[in-house]
Amino acid sequence: MRIERVAIIGLGLLGSSIALALKERAPGIATSGFDANPKVRAKAEELGLVGQVCESPVEAVREADLVILCVPVGAMRDAAVSIADALKEGAIVSDVGSSKQSVADALAEVLPGRCVIPAHPVAGTEQSGPEAGFATLFVGRWCILTPPADCDGEALEALSNFWAGLGAKVEVMDAAHHDLVLAVTSHIPHLIAFTIVGTASDLEDVTRSEVIKYSAGGFRDFTRIAASDPVMWRDVFLNNREAVLEMLGRFTEDLTALQRAIRSGDGETLHDLFSRTRAIRRQVIEEGQETPRPDFGREH
Amino acid sequence: MRIERVAIIGLGLLGSSIALALKERAPGIATSGFDANPKVRAKAEELGLVGQVCESPVEAVREADLVILCVPVGAMRDAAVSIADALKEGAIVSDVGSSKQSVADALAEVLPGRCVIPAHPVAGTEQSGPEAGFATLFVGRWCILTPPADCDGEALEALSNFWAGLGAKVEVMDAAHHDLVLAVTSHIPHLIAFTIVGTASDLEDVTRSEVIKYSAGGFRDFTRIAASDPVMWRDVFLNNREAVLEMLGRFTEDLTALQRAIRSGDGETLHDLFSRTRAIRRQVIEEGQETPRPDFGREH
């Protein structure tokens, strides 16, 4: 099975990055795209993101061997409904959503008999929209595929090769495990960042101007992921509720234990934990998932 | 009052950065330095950090107009005791500790009649040691001075000018308020980062290798500050206990509210918060406290 025509539904950060990566790394693949927002379509046209910016999802997917839904996870079902009758025989339908079980269920339900292979490239920035995309977003990052049990082997291989062609490393796992893993490595970090940034901006005894001035003490790091797309993240939390609540419970337990250590002056507990966490960063760097430069390579 | 000779006690990230900044921006100022660790002294000698690496704190401070204690806040008292009898008449004693009330109290107690002006440059990286320092660390960052009520005006002005000379912006506030502000902008963010990195590395149902592989989803951001110096941070929490517990209480309240919103499927509450937090990052960038480049300017 060869993927020769790709349709991208949703031309935000992820959709536009896929488009640009294809242009750069697989110029032989024909691309079409659609976005529900006419301004985004106009911008996509202006930037030349895809070969053809279409006025309807139906038009975009008609010839495609692979359709990638790049919309918030809460909008996946409607996006799938809108293309269901227009899909080419044998086309693969995939997505880039950050939670997978609910997306897998929705797509399976509204696209019966179709080849649905949910996917999640673990990559992004805090920016959004068609101008935020760039061709190297997926290079060295992992793309997790969560195929259904009865998935066609050739289609799975074709989708794996597609992502590898964009520079990603590909892993296959089941949707439920994906949702648990990403709850820890992505969803809870986002939830915590949103929370602390909200807490800090609502204090009475410390002004917002002070919070901003002295943010280089650590707070500014959290503002980055707290600047991520609000709709996308609302949908992630609503769609991965069980795993997020489970992991949040563990985090809260651990935080309570540290709170007790601080209250009781137990420096040993604090020092033990702080020494262990240092090693994790080294491993993240060694695995190629982070820059070795101090301070993320920020300019000083 | 002119500062012509500076002694730096403790030659880690902060001490070595002050030394390098002086070399670059104020080469007329003579510098001496001491570190309790002989290996650090040898490294400082090798790197040529200060004019004279001394074998004792007494030797280092004898001629100094300004002594800066660059040790963990829990070691400030002992460091001050070790130099008390050797200080030159009229010398200013300052520090770079991340909490100020406990340091101010300790220094006032063991250095009676001396000109003590606690300070906190809100700058750093996750790295530590004499090789981690660099001359531009303080450029554009705030340095907060927390002078006692009876502080000598000329000395305060001299210390302000000193930090401005290293590129910092200077603010004066009282120690208690400093500790509250920094609890929000620095200490709680660190505590949360240490906690989530600890939580993630201790799960049974998600392996550490998975956490590391998929860390680009947000988790890797937290590993940076969770890689900060364990002794320094243990001391911060033990020495700014009240403010940290107060702010932790507010954070936990807000987190509980979000947890409830997720559990009940209240997307509006989530979306409202996530929209507000986005604006804070813009302000942090506008204030010059953060790079405008996406993803901290990480290379892709």
Image (tube, coloured by chain):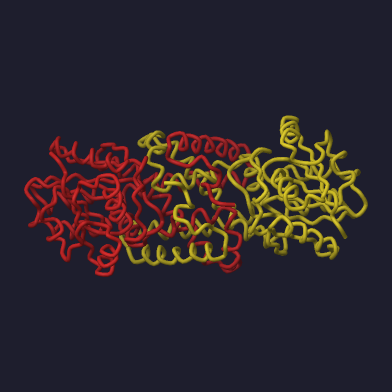
Chain colours: A yellow, B red
Nearer-the-camera pick, A168 or A182: A168
User: In the image, is residue A252 above or below residue B290?
Assistant: below
Nearer-the-camera pick, B45 or B131: B45
Which corner quadrant holds the N terminus of chain A? bottom right
- Residue ID at (16%, 49%): B5
Nearer-the-camera pick, A16 or B26: B26
Residue B66 at what x, y percent from top left?
17, 48
- Residue ID at (65%, 48%): A236
- Residue ID at (26%, 42%): B163
Tell me the quarter of the picture where residue A162 sits: bottom right
Residue A5 at what x, y percent from top left?
85, 49
The number of numbered discs placed on residues in the rendered structure image is: 0
User: In the image, is residue B159 above or below residue A266?
Assistant: above
Query: Is A60 on the left-hand or right-hand side of B245?
Result: right
Residue A48 at what x, y percent from top left?
75, 38
Tell me the quarter of the picture where residue B53 sits: bottom left
Query: Is B229 on the left-hand or right-hand side of B154?
Result: right
Query: Is A181 on the left-hand or right-hand side of A92?
Result: left
User: In the image, is residue A44 above or below residue B132?
Assistant: above
Nearer-the-camera pick, A252 or B195: B195
Residue B289 at what x, y percent from top left?
42, 40
